[in-house]
Amino acid sequence: MEELLTTVFTTAKPIPSQASNSLPKDLFSAINELKKELKAVILAHYYQDPDIQDIADYIGDSLGLSQQAATTDKEVIVFAGVHFMAETAKILNPDKLVLLPDLEAGCSLADSCPPEEFAQFKTQYPDAIVVSYINCTADIKAMSDVICTSSNAVKIVNQLPKDRPIIFGPDRNLGRYVAQQTGRDLILWQGSCIVHETFSERRIVQLKIEHPSAEIIAHPECEEPVLRHANYIGSTTALLKYSQQSPQDSFIVATEPGIIHQMQKEAPNKTFIPAPAMNNCACNECPYMRLNTLEKLYLAMKHKQPEIIMDESTRKAALKPIQRMLEMSK
Ligand code: 13P
Ligand code: SF4
C-alpha cells in the first residue's frame, strides 16, 4: 500500500518575467496561432468562463473530457478545468505535455479525501470493491478498483458483483444518489463539494413558486433536500441535453452556473435561472474552476507551463481503474 501513497509531484518552472507576460490585443487569434504551432488541443469543462468555452476544441463533462484525453492525437493537451481533470489526462498520456492554466485550480471534493485517511478507512473493509469518483487525487485513484463520473456511476455500480461490499468515495451526495438508484448498500466516504452544498432548498422552492412552469434540474453532487425537488438529475452533459430536449421553456439550474453559457447557446429561446446559494453570495461559482482565465490560458501555451508532472508508479497504479471505467462505460 505504501508505494501507492507516493506523493504526486506537480511542479511549476520559474515564473516568466513581466515582459514575457505581456498580452496580445487579440487573445483569441493569438491562442489559435499557438494551438497550431504546438499541435495542441484545448479541452474545457462547462464550469469555465464563457470565453474559455468559446475557444475550446471540446467542452464536456468529466467522462467526455477523459474520453477525449484518451483518444486525442494532438501533442499537447491544454486543460481548462481543475487539477484532477488535467491529472487524469496526464495519467492517460504520460508522453504528452499537459498544461493547466492555473495550478491552484484544485477541488474541495478531492481535498476532502486525504490519501492516508482513505487508506486507513479501506482497511476496515478488506473485501470491499473501491469505486472512486473521478474528483479525487491520483493517490486515491491508485487505491481504487474502478473510477466513475457523475454520468456513469450508476452504470458502473450496476456492473459490480452483488456479493461484495462497495466503498464509494469521496462524494457522499453522489454516493447516496447512486445507492438509491442501484439499490446497493454503499459504504460512503463523507466528502462533499463546497459549490453543490451551497444551494438553498428554501430559495429554490421560492424560485419555483415565482416560476411555476420552470423545471428544476440538478447535479447529483447536490444535497438530498435539493435533489428531492429536482425534475431531472444528471451530469453536466446530461443536464445540458435534457434542457434542450425537454418541451419546457424555463429551468432552475442547480449546478455551477458556467454551464448556462452552453445551455443558452444551444437553446437561445429558453430561460435558465441559476439556483441561488444560501446567502446572497456568488458561492455557486466554483472558485477553483474560475481561477483559469483566457489570459492564463494564453500564457500557459506561450511558456508551455505550468505542466502536470507525475510520479510514474502512482501514474501506473491510477491508470488501471481509469481504463476499467472507460471499458465499463462503453
Ligand atoms: P461533471 O462530470 O458532471 O461535469 O461534474 C464535474 C464536477 O466537478 C461537478 O462538480
Ligand atoms: Fe470540485 Fe465542486 Fe468545483 Fe466540481 S464544482 S471542481 S466538485 S469544488
Image (spheres, helix red, strand yellow):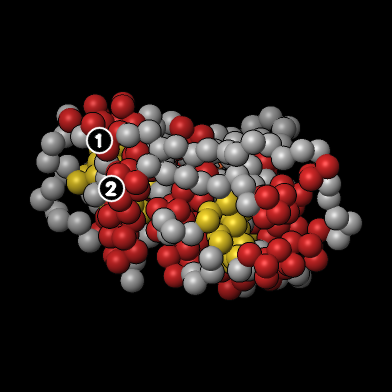
Q: Quadrant of residue 20?
A: top right
Q: Which residue lies at the image location 81% right of the left edge and 38% below the top edge? A: 18
Disc 2: which residue: 317
On the image, the x and y values in percent for residue 188 come to 30, 37
Relative side of 146 to 87, left or right: left
On the image, the x and y values in percent for residue 204 come to 63, 43
Q: Which of marks 1 and 2 is nearer the N terminus?
A: 1
On the image, the x and y values in percent for residue 217 come to 56, 55
Relative side of 123 to 312, left or right: left
**Count of picture labels:** 2
On the image, the x and y values in percent for residue 33 come to 74, 67
Q: Which residue lies at the image location 55% right of the left edge and 47% below the top edge? A: 307
SS type, badge 2: helix
Q: Is residue 59 visible?
A: no
Q: Quadrant of ligand 2?
A: top right
The amino acid type, in three-letter code, at marker 1 is Glu
Q: Can residue 14 be seen in this view?
A: yes
Disc 1: which residue: 3
The amino acid type, in three-letter code, at marker 2 is Ala
Question: Whole-Å distance between the Cαs marked 1 and 2?
Answer: 10 Å
Relative side of 149 to 36, left or right: left
What is the crowding at mark 1: few (fewer than 14 residues within 10 Å), some, or many (at least 20)?
few
Q: Which residue lies at the image location 73% right of the left edge and 67% below the top edge? A: 32
Q: Are marks 1 and 2 in contact (CB under 8 Å)?
A: yes
Q: Is residue 151 above or below residue 229?
A: below
User: Does ligand 2 reach within 8 Å of label 1's beta carbon?
Assistant: no
SS type, badge 1: helix
User: Does ligand 2 reach within 8 Å of label 2's beta carbon?
Assistant: no
Q: Nearer the viewer, residue 99 or 225?
A: 99
Q: In this view, does 270 lie above or below 315?
A: below
Q: Quadrant of residue 160?
A: bottom left
Query: Mark on residue 146?
Result: none
